[in-house]
Image (cartoon, rainbow, N blue to C red):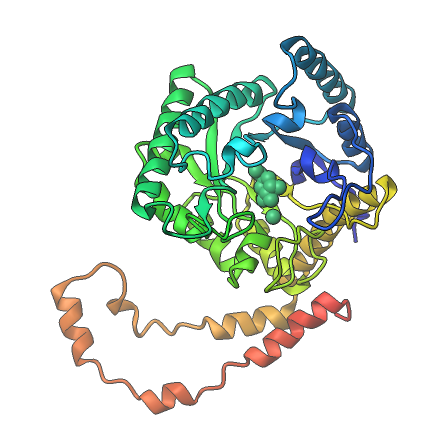
């Protein structure tokens, strides 16, 4: 058993907006004082994180003077150097300012769409200045409350045009930067376009430079849509599109709770960690979550340490599951193959099709076999409960 100390190779990262969350919600004001970006970096250094991510305006407020911006960047840079924390990802805030009340890239107003592009190019420059290699797009305001207001086909086209423009900007600047698109079904808009990771994957295939663009799935967002997150992530992984991931937790059917990783659905968190580790996922493990509103900054550190520690415990459990003889015997049995059907799979040929059409199947004998999934699942639960 390890002591679950985070290591750089775990690539555990947090956004400035996560540990910097001051506990404001729709029903109440802040409960924690605002810390500077530099102090948040020091907090992350203290808990053993690897990296910090930011929106342009988490680092530099939208209306500060250029001289002030330089001072903030200098302090931030010093804190990074002091702690060894790196900046793997950056993103743009295209949702807080009132100008984005009806969207950014999908707004009906060309001035808003142009401003969103300008703001994003500047934010990309800022992210690259601090070393970011992944650039996230979360279009929280790209949606509607009523479909009388926007043409949904036009919205897809506007979104595509913006992505193509920004990919070309990155190429033009010769930046080593990839995009990761993050879906969410609703909140803050009534409905958000490209609402799930699956939608995003389909959208990416229509871009001019699809190789530059992948996804950033978030646990809470797929759970809000009632989906199996592990399946969505597997689809992205298999397509070579899992460029980044937002880990947190969420009760099904609720608003975007952004709870500590593993706080609610331990079993699906386990299968997620197992999926990432078994497939040697090698990008950031970003905790896009925040501490309960009940906490002070000691509680924020408990929250951040808890995210990383739970991930590492689940990683250990996944290794245990993979090494458990009884579990592996069941897995082997479930996947047993006597080779008798081998000639029918793989690439189509008319001979194969003809032979397969002539093959007799004893349907009831095949269906009569018990699959022992009850046993396998119970063994999994017992690994998780720590009794094996
Ligand atoms: C916002 C949102 C997150 C996104 C962030 C990136 S900001 O907090 O809830 O899911 O990942 O823009
Ligand atoms: Mn997120
Ligand atoms: Mn969220």
Q: Is residue 15 visible?
A: no
Q: Is residue 374 above or below residue 286?
A: below
Residue 289 appears left or right of 243: right
Q: Above or below — where is 125 with respect to 157?
A: above
- Dividing the picture into quadrants, the one containing residue 300 is top right
Question: Could you say which quadrant of the image residue 123 lies in?
Answer: top right
Give the residue at x 66% y 29%.
58
Q: Which residue is found at the position 78% from the left and 47% from the top? A: 303
Toward the viewer: 237 or 175?
175
- Relative to residue 186, is residue 10 drawn left or right? right
Which residue lies at the image location 64% right of the left edge and 44% below the top edge?
A: 288
* Residue 290 higher or lower than 383, as above or below: above
* Residue 334 spot, x, y in % from top left: 49, 74
Whether residue 151 is visible, yes or no, is yes
Quadrant assignment for ligand 1: top right
Q: Quadrant of residue 379?
A: bottom right
In the depicted view, which residue is nearer to us: 170 or 238? 170
Tell me if residue 65 comes above or below residue 381 in the rendering. above
The C terminus sits in image quarter: bottom right
The image position of residue 59, as x and y in percent, is 66, 24
Q: Residue furthest front?
A: 148
Spot occupied by residue 166 in the image (x, y as percentages of width and height): 40, 26
Answer left or right for 148 relative to 12. Answer: left
Q: Which residue ends up furthest to the top in the rendered image?
A: 67
């Amino acid at each position: 058993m390890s002591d679950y100390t985070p290591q750089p190779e775990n690539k555990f990262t947090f956004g400035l907006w996560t540990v910097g969350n001051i506990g404001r919600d729709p029903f109440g004001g802040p409960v924690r004082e605002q810390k500077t970006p530099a102090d948040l970096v020091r907090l992350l250094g203290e808990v053993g994180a690897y990296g910090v991510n930011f929106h342009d305006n988490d680092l530099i407020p939208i209306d500060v003077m250029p001289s002030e911006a330089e001072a903030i960047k200098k302090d931030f840079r010093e804190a990074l150097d002091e702690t060894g924390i790196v900046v793997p990802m950056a993103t743009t805030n295209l949702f807080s300012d009132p100008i984005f009340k009806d969207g950014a890239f999908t707004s009906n107003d060309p001035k808003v769409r142009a401003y969103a592009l300008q703001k994003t190019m500047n934010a990309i420059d800022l992210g690259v200045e601090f070393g970011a290699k992944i650039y996230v797009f979360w279009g929280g305001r790209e949606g509607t409350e009523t479909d009388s207001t926007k043409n949904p086909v036009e919205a897809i086209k506007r979104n595509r045009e913006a992505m193509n423009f920004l990919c070309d900007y990155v190429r033009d600047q010769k930046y080593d930067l990839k995009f990761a698109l993050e879906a969410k079904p609703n909140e803050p808009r009534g409905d958000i376009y490209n609402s799930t990771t699956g939608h995003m994957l389909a959208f990416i295939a229509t871009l001019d430079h699809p190789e530059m663009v992948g996804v950033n799935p978030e646990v809470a967002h797929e759970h809000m849509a009632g989906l199996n997150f592990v399946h969505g992530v597997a689809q992205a992984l298999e397509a070579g599109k899992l460029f980044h991931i937002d880990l947190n937790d969420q009760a099904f059917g609720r608003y975007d709770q952004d709870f500590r990783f593993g706080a609610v659905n331990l079993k699906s968190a386990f299968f997620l960690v197992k999926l990432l580790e078994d497939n040697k996922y090698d990008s950031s493990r970003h905790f896009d979550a925040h501490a309960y509103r009940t906490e002070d900054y000691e509680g924020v550190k408990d929250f951040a340490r808890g995210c990383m520690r739970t991930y590492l415990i689940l990683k250990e459990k996944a290794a245990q599951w993979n090494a458990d003889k009884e579990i592996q015997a069941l897995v082997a049995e479930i996947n047993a193959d006597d080779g008798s059907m081998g000639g029918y799979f793989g690439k189509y040929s008319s001979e194969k099709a003809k032979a397969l059409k002539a093959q007799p199947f004893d349907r009831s004998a095949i269906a009569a076999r018990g699959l022992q999934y009850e046993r396998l699942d119970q063994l999994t639960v017992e690994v998780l409960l720590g009794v094996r």
